[in-house]
Image (cartoon, rainbow, N blue to C red):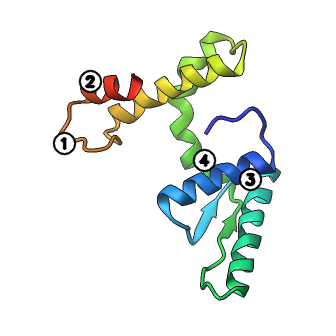
């Protein structure tokens, strides 16, 4: 997720979106970012309130381990290899538009797209890019 700021509200929005699509994880591994830590703590606080109201949801365990997070960070190498020669973006809109398409191409290449076996990659690319 690309956002203009890396703060608690952006982290909370990212984790809320992620939980909405994938469910609540037992553990989460993050870097030493204070924003990510604060975002997860906010979500854990909301889970605590829901627990007091009678909903049984487990807290998310936070692991801030540098070396476990490196595995996840390595996935961004391909994107950085493409964007570094560009010498940055002039505005947020152009960065967002470019990165969305680069990430789409990478997802298609890694076969992470929906119904990969039924639709060829180029058809999904045109459908998603339109």
Q: In the rendered structure, which disc, 4 or 3, sits on the residue that comes first in sequence?
A: 3
Q: Is residue 35 left or right of residue 124?
A: right
Image spot of residue 63 (x, y percent): 68, 64
Image spot of residue 102 (x, y percent): 48, 24
Q: Which mark is residue 31?
A: none
Q: How many marks?
A: 4
Q: Is residue 33 visible?
A: no
Inter-mark Cα distance, 3 to 2 = 35 Å
Q: In the rendered structure, which disc, 3 or 1, sits on the residue that comes first in sequence?
A: 3
Front in this rendered view, residue 68 or 21: 21
Q: Quadrant of residue 6?
A: top right
Q: Which residue is mark 4?
A: 70
Inter-mark Cα distance, 1 to 4 = 31 Å
Find out whether the residues at labels 2 and 4 contact each other: C-beta distance under 8 Å: no
Question: Pointer 2: residues within 10 angstroms few (<14), some, or many (20+)?
Answer: few
- Of the two numbered discs 4 and 3 in the rendering, the one whose residue sits closer to the viewer: 3
- Of the two numbered discs 1 and 4 in the rendering, the one whose residue sits closer to the viewer: 1
Q: Which mark is residue 117?
A: 1
Q: Which mark is residue 122?
A: 2
Image spot of residue 67 (x, y percent): 63, 53
Q: Which mark is residue 36?
A: 3
Question: Pointer 3: residues within 10 angstroms few (<14), some, or many (20+)?
Answer: many
């Amino acid at each position: 997720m690309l956002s203009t700021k890396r703060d608690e509200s952006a982290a909370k929005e990212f984790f809320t979106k992620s939980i909405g699509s994938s469910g609540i994880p037992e553990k989460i591994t993050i870097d030493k970012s204070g924003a990510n830590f604060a975002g997860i703590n906010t979500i854990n606080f909301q889970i605590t309130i829901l627990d007091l109201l009678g909903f049984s949801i487990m807290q998310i365990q936070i692991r801030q381990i540098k070396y476990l997070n490196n595995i996840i960070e390595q996935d961004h190498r391909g994107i950085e290899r493409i964007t570094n020669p560009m010498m940055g973006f002039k505005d947020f809109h152009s960065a967002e538009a470019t990165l969305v398409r680069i990430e789409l191409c990478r997802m298609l290449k890694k076969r992470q797209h929906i119904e990969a076996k039924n639709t060829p990659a180029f058809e999904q690319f045109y459908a998603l890019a339109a």
